[in-house]
Amino acid sequence: MSAALPIDIRNNIRHKIWAKADELDWPRISDVERTVWYENWTKDKDVGGVLSHFMDARKVRVYIKDSLLKPYLRSRLQDGWGQVLLAVNMEESEALLKKSYDKPHGRQLLDGRIICWGNSREWKSILISVFERAYRVDAGIPYAAVLMETGKTANAGMRQMILDASQKLELRHLAWID
């Protein structure tokens, strides 16, 4: 980077990209569609053109992907705790928090239950995280994995395989938010 990216410029670009990502329903679009949008933003004079004044032009696409869109996905998933509770038929009053996790998102409740959630394209990581986090905690319970459907696990055969994996890991609940 030749000079530090000013916060106001970063915030303006982030706002523009996040608004478009919301419009596109970013978590649900395919990798091919994402690639097209990375290229569009990189070539856009108001995004890539501005960023290239502060960094090597070859790094703009990576910056957009890693520094702007990864936090976008994390923030959208983090806001989904209420949906997660609904998906596993829990009331907020019974979900007393002991610890929060990131990558993938998760919570350890006071009673030892572990709940993790994320985009369905990351199902392996989410299921294993529930199991591993519960295993590491005294009296940990691998309680639930909640998957936000991204189009990767919509067919019945794939969902059955994921259900089988969750049962082998002794998760008590597996839910999808379509």
Image (tube, rainbow, N blue to C red):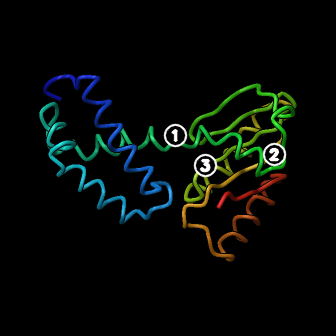
Whether 120 is drawn above or below 60: the answer is: below
User: How far apart, in angstroms, are the residues tagged by discs 3 and 1?
Assistant: 9 Å
Q: Position of residue 142 (x, y in %)?
A: 80, 45
SS at badge 3:
strand
Which of label 2 and label 1 is nearer to you? Answer: 1
> Would you say 25 lies left or right of 42 here?
right
The correct choice, above or below, for 51 with respect to 118 in the image is above
Circle 2: residue type = Tyr
Residue 52 appears left or right of 69: left
Residue sitting at x 60%, y 60%: 149
| Side of 47 relative to 114 (left or right) | left
Q: Residue 145: x and y, percent? A: 72, 50
State how far apart marks 2 and 1 are (Cα). 22 Å
For the N terminus, the quadrant is top left
Q: Are marks 2 and 1 in contact (CB under 8 Å)?
A: no
Residue designated by label 2: 143
Kind of residue sitting beneath label 1: Arg
Q: In the image shown, does 58 or 52 lie closer to the viewer?
A: 52
Amino acid found under the numbered disc labelled 3: Gly
* Nearest the eye: 76 or 145: 76
How far apart are the alpha carbons under marks 2 and 3?
15 Å
Q: Residue at x 81, y 53 (%)?
A: 173
Q: Quadrant of residue 166?
A: bottom right
Mark with earlier residue (3, 1): 1
Label 3, on which residue? 118
